[in-house]
Every structure is written in C-alpha cells, then in structure tokens.
Image (spheres, rainbow, N blue to C red):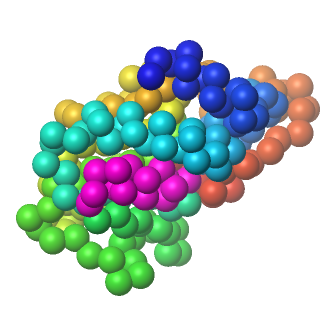
Amino acid sequence: MTNSETLAMFKSSGALLDGHFKLTSGRHSNSYFQCAKVLQYPEYLSAICGEIAAHFRDSGITTVISPAIGGIVVGTEVGRQLGVKTIFAERKEGTMMIRRGFSIDPSEQVLVVEDVITTGGSVVEVMEQVKAAGATVAGVASVVDRSNGKVKLADKQFSLLMMEVVSYAPEECPLCKEGLPIDAPGSRSNAQG
C-alpha cells in the first residue's frame, strides 16, 4: 500500500483534519490525523493493519503492545493478524504502566504499535516498560509517522504513512499568534509524546 493509497483512506473517512490542534506531544499543528475515524471501517482497519502485520510476520513477534488510547485498536488488529498476544499500556497518574493484569515475560519478542508518531514520546515510554520486564523490543510500528522517518525509535521500525507534517512548539505557533482557537482531540490534553 502506497502513501497516497493510505492518505486516500484518511481523506475519504474524514480522518485528516485541518485547523489548529494541540497534539498529544504538546506541540501545535494545522493538521491532525484522527486514526480512530479511519480505523472505524473494518475494510480500512484490516488493510492498514495487514500491511503492518506483513512487515513483521517473519520477525518472531510473540506479543504486541500499544499505548492507550490511540494505539489500542491498531495494536489489537495487528496482534490478531499475527496471531499473538496483544496488550496495552496506559497512564496512571501520568506514568505509562502495564496494568489490568497484563504481564510480559522476559522471553517475549515485543512489537510496539502506535497509531501516530510525532515525537515518539509515548512509544519510548512503552518501550521502557517492555525493557523493564526484561523482554526484547523487536520493533516499532505506526500507522502514521508525522516526522517522515526523522524520529528513529528502533532498528526495525515501520510506518504505513510517512509524511513530514509541520508542528510548532506552543510558544512559536503562528496559529496561536493569530488568535485561532485550538482543539486538543488526542487522548491526552496535556501531554509529552
């Protein structure tokens, strides 16, 4: 699947938004990828996650983990297509943790799956949890890489849609300077990654 084919799915489902947004990373942008809107359609979910699963099929993955909330749907479907255990990490009092009775064994080969990577902060936090459990981070995958590959998180990293999308530190945001209202559609309103 090409970048243009993936982008067409986002556009046709209304998942590529224009405006003034506060990203999960805390940065501001005039574009927002609302993956939930494209992933709500089973044919898109299956196709997108199938591409990710195919990329890692021969990598010995035993577990897929995703950061909540955005990565859960894509991570679950990638795990289903790979036929492996699928879990997620979530924040408790601001700290990413593996909870809800989930656990990772040191022998596991773990694929970290996220919906959108801008700075990679949430993925790094999940990777730290995997490593703390003694397991191996075998790869990182995302539906969208807003850095166009500039954010390197793992030796084996794959993103279906790679684009450089402009983002700004809040104090440098021209949209803020214009006084445009801001929307924070992500899963964290005051976030770091």
Q: Is residue 72 magenta?
A: yes
Which of the two residues, 72 or 120, is positioned nearer the viewer here? 72
Name which residue lies at 43% across and 53% down.
Answer: 77
Residue 136 quadrant: bottom left
Q: Is residue 85 above or below residue 73?
A: below
Q: Position of residue 43 (x, y in %)?
A: 57, 41
Q: Is residue 177 left or right of residue 137?
A: right
Q: Is residue 11 above or below residue 82?
A: above
Which of the two residues, 36 or 134, is positioned nearer the viewer here? 36
What is the quadrant of the N terminus in the image? top left
Q: Is residue 171 visible?
A: no
Q: Position of residue 189 (x, y in %)?
A: 68, 56
Q: Is residue 38 visible?
A: yes
Residue 125 quadrant: bottom left
Which of the two residues, 54 or 133, is positioned nearer the viewer here? 54
Magenta span of residues: 70-84
Name which residue lies at 39% across and 23% down.
Answer: 149
Q: Position of residue 143 (x, y in %)?
A: 48, 37
Q: Is residue 144 left or right of residue 34?
A: left
Residue 21 quadrant: top right
Question: Overall secondary structure of the magenta stretch?
Answer: helix
Name which residue lies at 52% across and 75% down.
Answer: 93
Name which residue lies at 69% across and 45% down.
Answer: 37
Q: Position of residue 131 (x, y in %)?
A: 20, 60
